[in-house]
Image: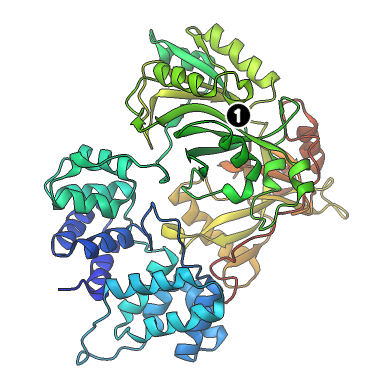
Amino acid sequence: MAALLIDFARTGDALAGTTKKLQKQALLADYFIGIPEADDLRRAVRFAGGRTFAATDERVTGVSGAILTDVIRDLLNLDPVTFRATAIRHGELGEAMGELWPSAGQAITPTLTLQMLSDAFDTLAMVASAELKKPILQQLYARCVAPREAAYLTKIITGDLRTGVQEGVLQASIARAFASALADVQRAHLIVGDSGDVAVLARAGQLASATFQLFHPIQFMLATPQETADDAALTIADRIFFAEDKLDGIRAQVHKSHDRVAIYTRTMDRTDASFPDVVEQVRKIPGEFLLDGEIVPWRNGQVLPFQHIQRRLGRKVLTPKMLKDNPAIFIAFDILYREGQSLLDFPFRERREALQDLLADDVFGMTRIHPVKSSVDIDRAFVDARERKNEGLILKDAESVYSPGKRGKMWLKLKTHLPTLDCVVTAAEYGHGKRRGTLSDYTFAVWDRDPGDTGRLVNIGKAFSGVTDEEIAQLTELFLKISTSNDGRVFQVAPQVVLEIAADQVQRSTRHASGYALRFPRVKRIRWDKKPEDADRLAQVVQTYESSVNFARGAPDLKPAPVSDPGLFDSL
């Protein structure tokens, strides 16, 4: 029996209705067990994980929010105002479709299958223009006879299921469904790269037969923050650790076989097109391998400010001048696979030897490491790294295996932040996911001069992390009361709330009226004890920008890179 979308939708609703991970695992496991065909099982697992294609498949449907909006409006004959209001209220297109889609009644049995979705996605990936994609989508939606079918068809297309099924839940569900050890499922996933294929192997009892293949991204190993060198020394205890500079770039993994090169970021996205010079750099290294490292802006043996890389991102065309003005290289610090052999379980010291052997005399191709034991060693290494204009320090246990996605005590990181800034909230925006019903994204500003007749607030950034759910609820209630205007999603608010903001760097920007922007801003605390006029002045921002600890200073005044894809509600 073919797997039906309506059954997938019912399972999805049940998943969304519970916050308990064990219950989610049980629901998914029962659903997977009931799917007899291997191909349908692959599709169900991939769709449940928010993917239209396998993780190892580089194809995309190319269906933007604008295309979906046009198709849905035409099918339902909706006026733009009603559609936009419904989408904003739900915070996503899927649930909006669930409300707006007419029910055909119980007399008509749903027949839309997961295979039909998969076949349509294959066709969507083959056609380039929006006008060719629209009739494919129209035919697919025309098969929906139940509102929940339309809702989950939309959710799958957008990759926005809102069921709370993260990778860990998905893997645990596969293990539970097919009586496999979770560790075996996790290991097979690292090797194979696609949860759908892992599920098929698990049902057949063949997880041990999984073999590693290049060109599927694996999760990066993460480092645990340490506040001071003394803290790091206590964590290290009597173990042997190596110190290396923490680079300020884009974490990336490079896959290479013959002339084929793929570069993946921490979000598991391909980024080759933004870095053709890095691709050519990697092609010159002989052999087949998988490297972990950092893409950094680079000229004359020195790392440049991060904005040089920002200038490239999101652009469809990179001119020779842009590449010349914003040069980049890949600096490796780990090797995970070479010539048919996985090195994930090798200790770090042996992986570094393999990396040295691969890169030979290419001194610019890899980080330098040296052993540290005491807080004095760590502090000296940290100062040296900062003098080289790098972010800080990474400390790695010499005996540590590579643990994808894990943040344990095998890798540590030490870096300082700039002085915090007290900023006034000028706008609050509805969030996404579990925060979609709250005002959780905050635009903030400083005074361009002392408040008074001539002083005004100028925006310098936006933050959504660092506040608790309880604080968000409190702020939401307040901002709704003091809102001066809104477009249904973004609320302009009276200057009343002061936030203490931490950031990694201050950089020049034409995006904000202040002329500056904060990199990686986050809320450190809400300053209920401060009045709006107590917030910092723009002069403080400029002073921080010019300080020796701010490595973004002196970078070119960059214009915002164009956005390659519209936001979810941009076309509504």
The spot of residue 463 in percent (x, y) is 59, 49
Position of residue 438 measured from the top left corner of the image (x, y, whole percent)? 48, 61
Residue 457 pos. (x, y %): 77, 53
Furthest residue to the right?
A: 454
Location of residue 139 by image quarter: bottom left
Residue type at mark 1 is: Leu
In this rendering, the answer to whether 556 lies above or below 149 is: above
Q: Is residue 111 left or right of residue 519?
A: left
Rendering colour mode: rainbow
Of residue 174 and residue 217, the one placed in the foreground of this image is 217
At horizontal 49% and vertical 38% (from top left) the residue drawn is 253
Which residue is found at the position 48% from the left and 47% from the top? 267
Label 1 sits on residue: 247
Comparing 488 with 315, the one in front is: 315
Residue 283 image point, x, y percent: 57, 37
**Residue depicted at 37% across the width and 64% down the height:** 161
- SS state under label 1: loop
**Residue nearest the viewer, comparing 167 with 212:** 212
Q: Is residue 221 left or right of residue 177?
A: right
User: How many residues crowd around disc 1 within 10 Å: few (fewer than 14), some, or many (20 or more)?
Assistant: many
